[in-house]
């Protein structure tokens, strides 16, 4: 048996050395653990932290991995290079006119950009649109009756032809009172600086407001009353009670022409007879 002892010692040393030096021991608790932790393969890295990208050189820029996870991992697929453009990114653009609206979209092209020699950027070359020309002018129906302080009307036509949209005015505030449609006036005042005025003495329907009374008109400074007195009173009576009171200038000239004066003088006589 003495010759077997050296062989047993050699076998023991060989078994221990597989896990390292005899006096170092195994991390997993020595021989009984079988040095299992020494034999587990390392984990593959799945996440990386990088340095900043380097300057663009010959169309490429690089960066380095500053850390990775999980802890103690190796390998993986870090992205440490990318293609790049050496030029400055465009920040401002000059465009062509917008094209015609087609299927709700219109486009334009970039005619120039800045700074000089730049590339990329975010030019705006399309936008939504309305296919028709926007209406600029409208024809309306008459205003409806006033109801609850508001009256409305409708658009009967618009221009230019075939237009759409625009900003027609189809409602307005109003007073519920009835609008005056008929007026009774005072006599015309004397002609002053080519104008004479009168006042409204009554209006209808009862309780109405507004409307469009005619309270001024152009006139001639010729004294129509004096002409009437000298030319017409002997036949038709005094001006105040003249049988032709209210006669128009066309009625006067139709019967007498310019026998008693010029057209302007006859107009003055007609004004005096109102």
Image: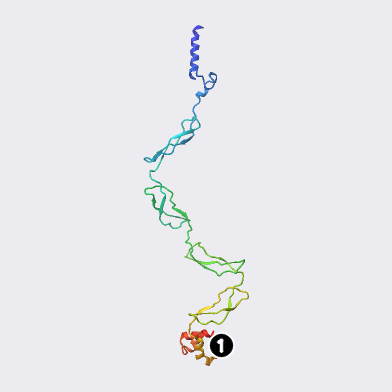
Residue 172: x and y in percent read 56, 66
Counting from the top left corner in percent of width and height, residue 262 is at 46, 87
Residue position for label 1 = 240
Quarter-of-image position of residue 246: bottom right
Residue 85 x, y percent position in the rendering: 39, 43
Q: Is residue 256 above or below residue 93?
A: below
Outermost residue on the bottom side: it is: 234
- Tell me the SS state at disc 1: helix
Q: Residue at x 41, y 51 (%)?
A: 92
**Residue reaching furthest right?**
206
Q: Residue 106, relative to residue 141: is it above or below? A: above
Q: Quadrant of the C terminus?
A: bottom right
Question: Toward which corner of the image does residue 171 lie, by quadrant?
Answer: bottom right
The number of numbered discs placed on residues in the rendered structure image is 1
Q: Quadrant of residue 64?
A: top left
Which residue in the rendered view is the most extreme toward the top?
2
Placement of 252 over or under 25, stated as above or below: below
> Can residue 251 be seen from the camera position used here?
no
Tell me the residue at 49%/11% (across/down): 7
Residue 30 in the image: above or below residue 219: above
Q: Residue at x 52, y 85 (%)?
A: 272
Asked whether 94 or 110 is in front, the reply is 94
Q: Position of residue 265 (x, y in %)?
A: 47, 86
């Amino acid at each position: 048996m003495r010759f077997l002892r050296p062989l047993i010692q050699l076998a023991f040393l060989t078994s221990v050395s597989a896990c390292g030096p005899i006096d170092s021991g195994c991390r997993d608790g020595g021989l009984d653990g079988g040095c299992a932790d020494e034999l587990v393969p390392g984990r593959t890295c799945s996440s990386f932290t990088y340095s900043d990208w380097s300057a663009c050189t010959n169309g490429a820029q690089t960066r380095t991995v500053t850390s990775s996870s999980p802890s103690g991992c190796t390998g993986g697929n870090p992205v440490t290079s990318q293609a790049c453009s050496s030029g400055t990114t465009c920040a401002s653009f000059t465009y062509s006119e917008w094209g015609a609206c087609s299927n709700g979209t219109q486009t334009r092209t970039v005619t120039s950009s800045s700074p000089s020699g730049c590339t990329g950027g975010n030019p705006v070359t399309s936008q939504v649109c309305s296919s028709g020309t926007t209406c600029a002018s409208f024809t309306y129906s008459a205003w409806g009756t006033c109801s609850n302080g508001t009256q409305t009307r409708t658009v009967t036509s618009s221009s230019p032809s075939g237009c759409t949209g625009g900003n027609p005015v189809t409602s307005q505030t109003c007073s519920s009172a009835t609008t005056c449609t008929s007026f009774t006036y005072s006599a015309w005042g004397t002609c002053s600086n080519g104008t004479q005025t009168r006042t409204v003495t009554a209006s209808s329907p009862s309780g109405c407001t507004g409307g469009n009374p005619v309270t001024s008109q152009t006139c001639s400074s010729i004294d129509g009353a004096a002409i009437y007195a000298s030319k017409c009173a002997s036949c038709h009576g005094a001006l105040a009670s003249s049988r032709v009171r209210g006669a128009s200038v066309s009625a006067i000239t139709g019967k007498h022409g310019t026998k008693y004066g010029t057209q302007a003088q006859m107009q003055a006589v007609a004004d005096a007879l109102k």
